[in-house]
Amino acid sequence: MTSSLGRQAPGTADAQDRPTRFSGFRPEVQGLRFVAVLLVVVYHVFLDRVSGGVDIFLLISAFFLTLSFVRKLEAGRPLALGRYWLHVFKRLLPLAVLTILGTLLLAWVFFPETRIDRIREEALASVFYVENWALAVAQVDYYAVDDSGSSPFQHFWSLSVQGQVFLLWPVIFAAAAVVCRRFRWRPVPVLAVAFGAVFVGSLVFSVVRTAGDQAFTYFDTRARLWEFALGSLLALAVPYLNPAKGLRVVLGWAGLVSMVLVGVLVDVQGAFPGWIALWPLLSAAAVIVAGSSGSRWGVDRVLASGPLVRLGDAAYALYLVHWPLLITYLVVRDRPMAGPRSGVAIVVVSLLLALLATRFVEQPLKRWAWPERSRRRLAAVVLACVGLVAVPVLAVQQAEARRIAEITAQADRNNPGAAALAPGFEYRGDPDAEAIPVVTGDYYEKPALGEPCSADLGLAEISQKWCFETVPQEAPGATLMVIGNSHMHQWIPAIEELAEQKNLRVVTYIRGNCLYSTPDEQIADHEACALWLEGVDPAVHAVDPDLVMVQGTRSTDDNQEMFTPGMEQRIKDLAARGIQVIGLRDNPRFDYVPAACAVEKGADDPECSSSHVILSPDSPFDEVAENSARVSMVDMNDLICPGGRCPPVIGNVFTYWDNNHLTVEYVQSLAPMFTERVLAAIGADGADNLLAR
């Protein structure tokens, strides 16, 4: 018996029966697991859309995990968290490690060299169950149209979230056990409150953050916890639900049809993991609540059939292997998506590999008794699995780091960069020296912007985060303010040299993707750029610069040069305030990555260099500069694209690190010419007045 407060009365028949309510193998749920993963595979291969299958997979994992722990709590057995954690990762890691090692082999054989270093890093992130955070920080677009550029480890994001929950959820159960012992409460109500709170808090967080930053939120563990919490709440409720046979039949088929149609009927791109994920999850919940209908017409007759249950056993392996096979095929064939015939082949091969891996790797290791005899043995197996990936990958990374350090140490002699364009230049370095920066495929580091601006400037909090004291000076001759986006950010190494030569204080107000124009003229991130623009005038007023440097024009990868009315008006407004304005003409953008092309085909290959309309001597900025003594333009493009063509390497230095940003190393080599042209643009009198030594 229990009191009205839900207190426990030990020794009663009800207390003895409660653990059995949460026990029992659910064959229809095992079949549902396979259907969920098959949806993921089919939608990835053929439709390149989100199916909701991953979300169902996460819900089912929480469902079974919760049933297991509630049985222990109701029976009063110890939770043994340490042993549980070791046991679960001993079960998960072998197939994961096999997939990671196989994927590394595929990458080494078939992938471009420029991607290998990043792939190695993601292999480490995957084996340590943090791949979701690695993708989030890297701002990976899960909905990218061309999957051939996706990481072969991208699908490990959900397994990483699952692994993190497998660490967190037992802690919640342990806390519930302490509360139940202290107050003699029953576990189910306590857990219902706990997981209900997680569900509400995480769902609200997910909805809000998805609307603000969907790309990051898609991989954010915090935005996914509600899906697991729903699975746990379902596990707590199902033993007490007993729908009629007819209702079970309706629930089962309605849930199955609904979950299959999610990706077809709803364009969920940009919406997951917000509230829209409730659709596939509630569909799966309906199937689970329907359970065993006892009717020949019930969906469980299909899901609980022998073949589907056995395929459910292989669902984990199928999820693991399908994605690297798909991405490898797309890389080899240089395609954005698989076709119908190739897609069928990928699905069939993935399924065969999954069945073989399950039968000959997962199941034998699951039956392996030796590790289960002690926690020390379990720990040894887990560490061995992690080590099979971590040791060789870290060793290769260390060797690569030493090689890069040796190359960089000789840069002054072997990598002159833009200096090689000077008349009469004679190269005296090693004839076989590698170009810098060494192309590794890792995400390139942008130049440092220095310390945040002092709070004494009085900027609003939203504006403060974009303001930096990039070059502080105790007694500056003048103040230079740099305003713009990443195409101004890339020039910081050259601007720093200008500042050192002319005793300039440099303050930057930079936000990537934002044009110094109007909110309506933004290319991307419209809301964030509108906030950034609101802070521009207050920042200029607070800094009170003598000279402002902005992006004068914008190039496009479809061979155009933009100079919008909003950009023009902003520049005129600065000049009207008596501020000297330097507009940097943008550098060309391409629809390919010059450095990657050079590594793959050779720097001299004609396909790795091209021209652009922005290399024309005439610019839409000219009229503004001609009509105002306080406005000048600086054009560095003849030193980036000499002779009207943009080679990937100049002076043994890569010019671009992606398709539109210059490398730090090449900008550094341009610094003397940059300083010379800025001073020339201001004019002798202006230089004497504004840039005092």
Image (cartoon, grey):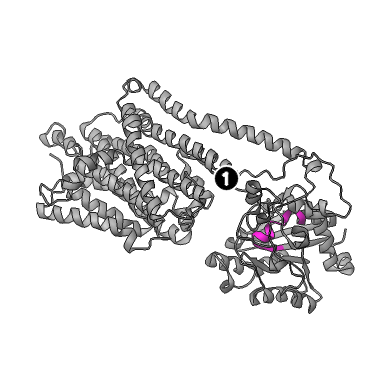
The quarter of the image holding the C terminus is bottom right
Residue plotted at (50% across, 36% down): 105
Residue at the limit of the structure toward the front, as seen here = 341
Mark 1 lies on residue: 112
Vertical arrangement, residue 309 with respect to residue 56, above or below: above
Question: Residue type at mark 1?
Answer: Pro
Residue 118 part of the magenta-drawn span? no
Which of the two residues, 421 or 460, is positioned nearer the viewer here?
A: 421
Q: Residue 103 appears at what percent x and percent y?
A: 47, 39
The secondary element bearing badge 1 is classed as loop
Q: Residue 241 appears at what percent x and percent y?
A: 16, 48
Q: Residue 298 appears at what percent x and percent y?
A: 14, 51
| Residue range of the region highlighted in magenta in the rendering | 482-494
Residue at the limit of the structure toward the bottom, as seen here = 627
Within 10 Å of the Cα at label 1, are there few (<14), some (14-19), or many (20+) other Cα atoms? some
Relative horizontal placement of residue 655, taking residue 1 as reference (left or right): right
Relative horizontal placement of residue 48, taking residue 291 as reference (left or right): right
Vertical arrangement, residue 8 with respect to residue 202, above or below: above
Residue 492 part of the magenta-drawn span? yes
